[in-house]
Amino acid sequence: MEALQAQEQFDFNCYFKAYYQEMYYIAKRIVHNHYTAEDVIQEAYIKAYRNYVYLSDHAKGRAWLRTIVIRTAIDFYRKETKYSVASVEAQAEEGHECCVATKQVQDQFDYQVNIELIQQALLNLPIRLRQVIELKLTNDLSDAKIAEKLNISLSAVKTRLHRARKQLILWNPCHD
């Protein structure tokens, strides 16, 4: 009996090692997050290990394992999405301002970092370029309205917008 268990343990370990990377990428494509994908793989392998004895055709082990990983990943994704939406709705009901309704904390962090980098880049523009780009982006004014508001020509607005965009593209936060 122990020899049979040892053989089954060996076979399952072979499946685990042989298909881990492939199953990880399948899970990551579904849940879109490294850490959640690792959790999915762990949960899927636990399910597979518990039911490995019921696998009648070991030649189909890869497809069987893949099905378990996909279904587990979908379950994780549904739970995560449901929790995220409920959390954002609860915050909105309480009057809290939500910055972005994303699924992941990492996405929220990246979004905040990008906002800060954009603000820093805008602050590094000369004032005459910054005024024009801020009116264009934040107030959504037409070029003609910007010209009227700043009392400059339409061609000056277009030139300043072009220069501001060019400087924003070339801006490097490491050199400030």
Image (cartoon, rainbow, N blue to C red):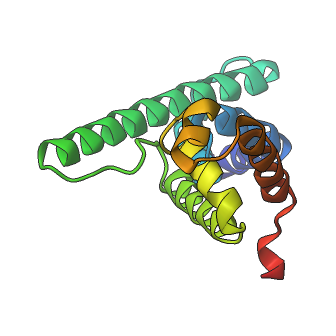
In the image: residue 131, left or right of residue 165:
left
Quarter of the figure with the C terminus:
bottom right
Can you give x and y, in whole percent of width and height, for residue 57 in the image?
A: 74, 17
In the image: residue 89, left or right of residue 41:
left
| Residue occupying image coordinates x 64% and y 49% | 133
Q: In this rendering, does residue 45 appear at all?
A: no
In the image: residue 152, left or right of residue 84:
right
Residue lying at the far left of the rendered structure: 94
Location of residue 119 with respect to 148 vertically, above or below = below
> Which residue is at the front of the view, 166 or 157?
157
Can you give x and y, in whole percent of width and height, for residue 107 in the image?
A: 55, 51
| Residue occupying image coordinates x 52% and y 37% | 47
> Which residue is at the front of the view, 105 or 14?
105
Q: On the image, which quarter does residue 90 sit in?
A: top left
Location of residue 170 with respect to 29 vertically, above or below = below
| Residue occupying image coordinates x 81% and y 44% | 159
Q: In this rendering, does residue 34 appear at all?
A: yes
Can you give x and y, in whole percent of width and height, for residue 147 in the image?
A: 61, 40
| Residue occupying image coordinates x 52% and y 32% | 72
Q: On the image, which quarter does residue 56 sit in?
A: top right
Can you give x and y, in whole percent of width and height, for residue 174 in the image?
A: 81, 78
